[in-house]
Amino acid sequence: MVDATSIVTALGAGSGIDMAALATNLASVQFQAKTERLAAQSELLERQISSAASIKSTLSLLATAFGERVRSGDLSPSPGVANASVASASSPVGTSGKGSYTLEVLALATTQTLAAPPLAGAESPAGAGTLTFRFGTASASGFTEDTAQAALDVEIPSGATLSDVANAINAKGAAVTAYVAQTATGAQLVLKGAEGAKNGFIVEATESAGEEGLAALAWNPAAAGDPARLLSAAGDASFKLDGLAMTSASNATGQVAPGLSLTLTGTNEGAPTQVAFANPTANISSAMQDFVSALNELTGQLRTATDPLSGDLARDPGARALERALSQLGSEVIMPSAAEGAPRTLADLGLSIQRDGSFALDTARLEATLSRDPAGAASMFTSGLYGIYATLDRMSRNAAKTGDPGSLAGSIARYQTQSSQVSEDTTELTERQEALRASLTARFAKADTRISASQSTLSFLKSQIEAWNASSD
């Protein structure tokens, strides 16, 4: 007896297979291994980027924070003025000073202030032409030109008002500024120069025919200029440092002693005040404790990241380079110009490295150094070319060199490039998988159509077989 069910099953009729799901599953299986491998690569690269960036950031923060303490914090040998109303003191970048000075300010630097005759209002016509400013030493009775300073020409356009004149002067961005003051007698143009005796000025006017008026703004004491218009004359600052007479064209004196600049704000003639540099020695011990703790945080990150078995940066050249630099930190000479016998290394300040790469503070050695040479120890805490901050800053900059394949930044750039390539490969793989799925779906759809078309044939065969079986009985 022929079994109709087995024939139908063999031909696939009535299988109920979801051809679309079958195509999707087959396409997924085809690319599963590659997809999983790319996903694992992407995850590892992201961890490597994150780990390297975190270590680089920790090093940068350490260098920045230490620099702030050295420049303006408790480690700064910054100068201060006992009488703060007289002056403020600072150290120019890259310099340092020590000791103390006396300061007596006799006169502040002043600017020339000149007023023009009054007009009815700020919008009153002022004339047209050219105003020429010449600079030098000016007083109510005379003027001596400083030929080293070029004259300033200001073009005043036709129809200009007093406000337009002020705007034209200010637009030059030069050593003279102007504004219009509304006084009891009317609107007056006020002219102000820069600080310093040689920054006085006179005003000459060349008028346009038919639009006279600028001549009223001109002023020259040597040519019967109205002395009442000179509200204040330009002058130099005058002061004594340790009894030595000094002058400055500006109240910002620039460097007047090693590591010392002043900004004069008041006078104290006959009552000298003290200018002294702070001594950071008392804060060095606590600073070294903080320094060791910060270094251990950094080395802890590095140790985890470079673990041979589980570290994401186990073979990373940038991380290894930083490890080597840190391992040499205690013995590196960071004060090459120090005098014989003076502290030259961080080991002299008590920094020691343990077997596991962590840091510790040898307080006995630190105290011995501070007792033997406190000034030498303090000199290591500077913002200059050498010292602890310069060493940290150099390490941070080296780690941040993107173009150096042996730096952390170079490693990050490399990982980012690789991550971009993995993303592109993943996209391409997804497109190929989708193309295979679409192809299989189309092929299975045709097969399903053929199977459906055979259903009538199968039904006929089934009825014939049943008839044969009935006749045989």
Image (cartoon, rainbow, N blue to C red):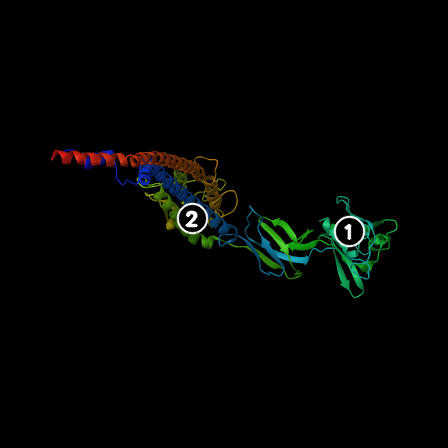
Q: Is residue 187 above or below residue 155?
A: below
Residue sticking out furthest to the right: 210
Residue sticking out furthest to the front: 471
Q: Position of residue 194 (x, y in %)?
A: 71, 52
Q: Position of residue 294 (x, y in %)?
A: 41, 49
Q: Is residue 444 above or below residue 243?
A: above
Residue at 68% across, 58% down: 106
| Classed neighbour count for the residue bearing mark 1: other residues with Cα under 10 Å, few (<14), some (14–19), many (≥20) | many
Say whether residue 308 is visible: no
Q: Nearer the viewer, residue 310 or 76?
A: 310
Q: Which residue is mark 2?
A: 369
Q: What label does residue 201 carry, if any?
A: 1
Residue at 39% across, 44% down: 51
Is residue 398 rendered to the left or right of residue 214? Answer: left
Numbered marks: total: 2
Marks 2 and 1 in Cβ contact (< 8 Å): no
Quarter residue 53 falls in: top left
Secondary structure at badge 2 equals helix
The amino acid at mark 2 is Thr
Q: Position of residue 17 (x, y in %)?
A: 28, 40
Quadrant of the frame with the C terminus? top left
